[in-house]
Image (cartoon, rainbow, N blue to C red):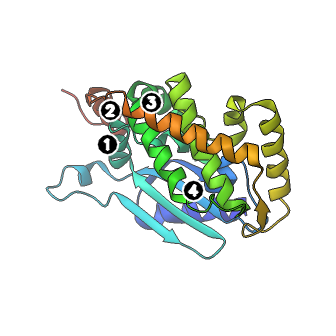
Amino acid sequence: MRNRILDKISTIEKEKKIKIWFACESGSRGWGFPSPGSDYDVRFIYSREQKEYLSIQDPELYLNFAIDDELDINGWDLKKTLLLIKKSNTTPFEWLQSPIVYKEEAGFKEELMAICYQYFNQRSNIFHYLGVAKGAMETIAEEEIKIKKLFYILRPLLAAQWCMEKNEIAPMTIQELLKLVPLNLKDLITNLIEYKKDVEESHIITIDSNLKKYINTTFQSCTEFAGSINTVIFEKDKLDLFFINKMGFDQR
C-alpha cells in the first residue's frame, strides 16, 4: 500500500502541477488504533507556482481524491494551512506529528511545527477536541458501544485533557496521550487497542464502568476549565515570513 500511495502522490504532483511539501497518514492508523478494515487517510500540504499567488483570483486551496473504499487522499494549499495555524486549528498540529510520513521536503515539518507551538490557543484547542468527542458520546449512555466509536471518544477527550493540564499542543497518537490516564485504565485501554487490531470497527464491546466514569468526569472538567479562560488572537507575521521564504518571493 505504501508504494501505491507514493505513486499516487507523485501522480497528483505532476497532474496538478503542484509541489507537495509534506504528506502523512491521518485517521485511525495515524492515531495509533487501526482495525483490519481501516482505510488509509493520506493528507498533504502543497503549493502552486509563484504566479498563481499573484493573480486576482485565489488558487484552489483544497484538493480531494476519493480513490476507493481503501484509500482517501486530500490536501491543503500551504496558504490555507498557514491561515488555519493562525487560528490555532488542531488539524495541521496533528498532521505534522503523524508517525507515518509518506513525503517531506527536508526540514519542512520541523520548521513549521516550531511555529505551530507559538500559535497554540488553549481554549480553542480544548473546545475543538471536546466537540469531536461529544459527537461520539451520544451512544455512551448505553452499556455497549462500537469499539471504533469508543476510540473516537477517548482520543479527542484525552487530547482536550492534555491541552488543559499541560497548556500545550496535544500529541497525535493515543499511546502518548495515555500518559494522562490512571494505570488501571491505561492497561485497559492498551488491551482494547490490541483487541481492535483483530476485530472489525463495528464490533460491539461493553464499556467498563470505571472507564465510563472517567470519560464523563473528564469531559465535564475540561468543559468547565475551557469556559473559564480567554481566547487568544495571534498576529500573522511569522506565518507570512514562512510563506514568503518557502515560495521564494523577493522581499525587497
> Mark number for residue 83?
1
Farthest residue to the bottom: give it.
Answer: 68
Q: Which residue is identified by label 2?
A: 239
Q: Amino acid at mark 2?
A: Leu
Of callouts 1 and 4, which one flags the residue occurring earlier in the amino acid sequence?
A: 1
- At x 79% / y 65%, what residue is drawn? 36
In the picture, the quarter occupied by the C terminus is top left
Of callouts 1 and 3, which one flags the residue occurring earlier in the amino acid sequence?
A: 1
Q: Nearer the viewer, mark 1 or mark 2?
A: 1
Q: Nearer the viewer, mark 3 or mark 2?
A: 3
Q: CA distance from mark 1 to mark 4?
A: 30 Å
Q: Nearer the viewer, mark 2 or mark 4?
A: 4
Q: CA distance from mark 3 to mark 2?
A: 29 Å
Of callouts 3 and 2, which one flags the residue occurring earlier in the amino acid sequence?
A: 3
Q: Evaluate if marks 1 and 2 touch, with contact meaning CB atoms under 8 Å apart.
A: yes
Locate residue 10, reporting x and y percent.
56, 60
Q: Evaluate if marks 3 and 2 touch, with contact meaning CB atoms under 8 Å apart.
A: no
Of callouts 3 and 4, which one flags the residue occurring earlier in the amino acid sequence?
A: 4
Locate residue 171, reporting x and y percent.
60, 35
Residue 28 to residue 155: above or below: below
Residue 218 to residue 200: above or below: above
Q: Which residue is identified by label 4?
A: 137
Q: Evaluate if marks 1 and 3 touch, with contact meaning CB atoms under 8 Å apart.
A: no
Locate residue 172, reporting x and y percent.
61, 40
Q: Is residue 78 left or right of residue 194?
A: left
